[in-house]
Amino acid sequence: MRSQSCPLCSNFALSSNCSSIPSLAWIKCTQVGTSSVRLMFLISASVHKVLTRPCMSSLIFLALDLVSVPTGPWLTEPCQKPTTRHSFINSHYQKKMGSLRAILSNPDDLYPLLKLKMAARHAEKQIPPVPHWGFCYTMLHRVSRSFALVIQQLDTDLRDAVCIFYLVLRALDTVEDDTSIATEVKVPILMDFYRYIYDREWHFSCGTKDYKVLMDEFHHVSTAFLELGRSYQEAIEDITMRMGAGMAKFICKEVETVGDYDEYCHYVAGLVGLGLSKLFHASGKEDLASDAISNSMGLFLQKTNIIRDYLEDINEIPKSRMFWPRQIWSKYVNKLEDLKYEENSVKAVQCLNDMVTNALMHAEDCLKYMSALRDPAIFRFCAIPQIMAIGTLALCYNNVQVFRGVVKMRRGLTARVIHRTKTMSDVYGAFYDFSRMLKSRYDASIVDQVDGTDHKARETKDRLEAILRTCRDSGTLNERKSYIIRTKPKYNSTLIVIIFIILAILIAYLSSTRPYNMCKFLKKIKKLLNGNDFILSDTLFFLPAGLVSTF
């Protein structure tokens, strides 16, 4: 018999003689009443004979915690880190249970997540057997899974061209991003990179992880590039040359003014927009878009990434990467890195809002560009990242967490964007919803102001109203499915949790008493999903090792 109590409070003590569930006391107890804990322990005792793995009990206990504390965190760090190796609360299960809570809180995400998982598996199976093309598409999946998904819907010749275009620029970006490369070595490589894509033997070791593999085996990319149509090759060569020269320029120059910021973003992203427009035109599927709005497509995405990745860039080792323009951040702090310190939180958020306002200036051009596209596959290829950008800006605005960690759209919402985006009316609806979300954050920031030091407040409001007006004027908003506005809950979260607990207990019971029937049941599910593993397989199906081997 063991008795444990929370070291931070004396609300309860749990006792258990169950060797398979040794860590019950480490359930987060803050804000959880004694009766809730007793209920959790009672249910654990009643089903513990059929729970063959600790993670199944974790599932049940954490689901009950959601019922007990509906407004609290789904899973936080335990009161004190357990020392036993059998502990069921650890970083792996925190991640899994956090994803599970997101699904339970947003049940509409489940079907798009399932579709996205199946699409990813399908895309991985479509990798060409030819070695150099196989390498290119494999690397595409490794360095950008989301991009690899949207590219698959393009026709074969355009898909190949866009794949190589992306990998060439990703390799160029890897050279630029590697702060360990000496300037006298890096600059000539950036300047001459457009020549290397014609050399089947060239490679250069830099970067880390998958990016290092891409650079070490770059000859595969060059070989595939040389098999593209001449019009595709010329477009890729031109953009690579201009981008490399621009990157080399900013290796020796800091981003001082907003003009410098726009110029840098043009080189590293605006040119991508121009290049894609050229590839679309070369395919014969689209008219050639103007350079101005093509540039805005790239700048909107790049500025969003620069805003979101502040902390990662400023903490880069051995040297910080600083892309926020001094003209903006110097109004708030003396050094760019000062924004990450807690004592500067108010100034940091004001600077962040200034940066978001700057990015919003490109939104209307993006809507104009997308509204002119004719090919459905090209449209979706362009529209999905732009919706993700406006959604990310909505999350970042007035959010101090940008300076504390990673702020990004949840996976389920990303899946819904990919699933829903089919027509321009979907784009107008998404931009409208996320702009309204951003405007609500703007309104909150105005209320919170005590010194009236938001230098861009009026400009922020004007840009948001312009986006909202463009979306309303499209006349398609009544056709949309809202991403963020729900007048009445579609599901009762408590009921969902209870159903989930019942299913978990049923699966545990079947797996321990009727393993053969359980195997048949799971095989039918796999057959129904065309051989694809269920998206929640590693969260729901905690089966004994013997049963897994038969399945």
Image (cartoon, rainbow, N blue to C red):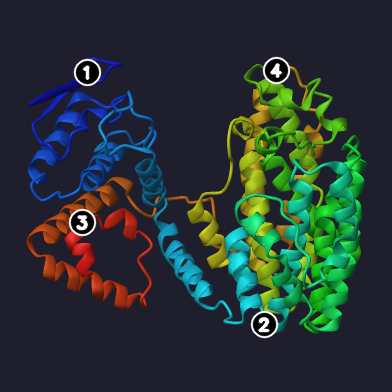
Q: Which residue is mark 2?
A: 155
Badge 2 marks a residue whose secondary structure is: loop
Q: Earlier in the sequence, mark 1 or mark 2?
A: 1
Report the mark closest to the observer, 2 or 3.
Answer: 2
Q: Residues within 10 Å of mark 4 (few under 14, many from 20)?
A: few
Q: Is residue 542 visible?
A: yes
Whether label 4 touches label 1, CB < 8 Å: no
Q: Quadrant of the N terminus?
A: top left
Tell me the distance, in whole angstroms, between the alpha carbons under discs 1 and 3: 30 Å
Q: Which residue is mark 1?
A: 11
- Residue found farthest to the front: 201
Q: Which residue is mark 4?
A: 450
Q: Quadrant of residue 424?
A: bottom right
Write the residue at 42% across / 65% down: 114
Q: In the drawing, does residue 178 fall left or right of residue 488?
A: right
Query: Above or below — where is 143 with respect to 526?
Result: above
Q: Amino acid under label 2?
A: Asp
Pointers 3 and 4 in contact (C-beta within 8 Å): no
Q: Earlier in the sequence, mark 4 or mark 1?
A: 1
- Residue pointed to by mark 3: 503
Q: Earlier in the sequence, mark 2 or mark 3?
A: 2
Label 4 or label 1, whichever lies nearer to me, is 1
